[in-house]
Image (cartoon, rainbow, N blue to C red):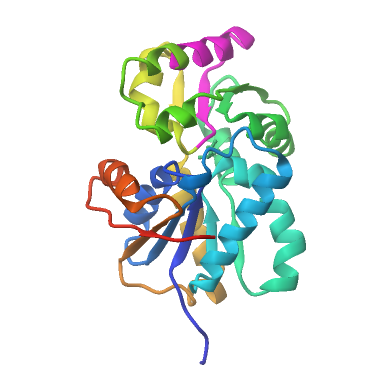
Amino acid sequence: MNETQGSIGVFDSGYGGLTILRELQRRLQDYDWLYLGDNARAPYGNRSFEIVYEFTRQAVMTLFERGCHLVILACNTASAKALRTIQQQDLPKIAPERRVLGVIRPTVEALGDISRNGHIGILATPGTVRSRSYSLETAKLYPGMIVTETEAPMWAPLVENGEAHNPGADYFVKKYVDALLEADPQTDTIVLGCTHYPILLPKIRQYTPPHIRIIGQGDLVAESLADYLRRHPEIERRCTKGGKTEYLTTESPDKFNGIASYFMRARVEATQIVI
Ligand code: DGL
């Protein structure tokens, strides 16, 4: 068979996708990964639909050019604002045999098993919240659930600027958790609907009552991808297996390597690219 193969692409506006990549590496150890962080243009959360779509399309094309047949948008904002257009309009024209998957659908699918009273709180970027993607997807799968979406516009910038563990972050962490719980005091499950947010988890946990579950997306996305690869052998056989990860960033590698090595608990050496 004369088919090309490549790594699985993982894209985020910046560092947030690393929280997904870590779980992908753990769950799917044999595969090769190519991570792309558009750190020079992050955060995406306050940007318009058109800009998020255009930046995401450029990133996907870059990963395709570097051999990926499958790309995971490890970014809720990109999944909310660009995924559908890329899947429905771009792929059939430019790469009908390649696939792009997002992180919102696998997260929503898991909610049925997680919430006890059906009151779900979503903390996400303004772009994701205003798209209402979580409410719409949940209404399709679990029509009885009450979904409250709250914007946390300062959280991704805190992470991108390396401030997630500093005392200044406490004010904004408490502010958005309080706003969500005020909007629905019955919330029993909070979904961190932005891949940057697990990096703030120690502080988010500190300001959230202990009976409320806090859900990150990494293991949900990893489980869903494992299932996808089982169901799609035509895509699976195009993914190389060497257990390696390469990193690309649009920012200076010196800056990226320090923060990324900390999050990945391993030495990261990224290559800078222009997209
Ligand atoms: N990590 C991204 C997300 O999941 C985007 C954060 C941002 O760039 O504002 O939404």
Q: Position of residue 62 (x, y in %)?
A: 54, 65
The magenta segment: 173-194
Q: Is residue 192 magenta?
A: yes
Above or below, 48 relative to 207: below
Left or right: 270, with 238 as reference point? left
Above or below, 71 relative to 122: below
- In the image, 179 versus 117, the foreground residue is 179
Left or right: 31, with 266 as reference point? right
Q: Residue at x 26, y 41 (%)?
A: 262
- In the image, 181 versus 213, the foreground residue is 181
Q: Residue at x 45, y 25 (%)?
A: 214
Q: Is residue 231 visible?
A: no
- In the image, 112 versus 26, the foreground residue is 26
State the image quarter where residue 95 is shown. Answer: bottom right
Q: Residue at x 35, y 26 (%)?
A: 163
Q: Position of residue 154 (x, y in %)?
A: 51, 24
Report how many numbered discs are placed on residues in the image: 0
State the image quarter where residue 202 is shown. Answer: top left
Q: Is residue 89 magenta?
A: no
Q: Is residue 244 visible?
A: yes
Q: Residue at x 54, y 60 (%)?
A: 275
Above or below, 156 relative to 181: below
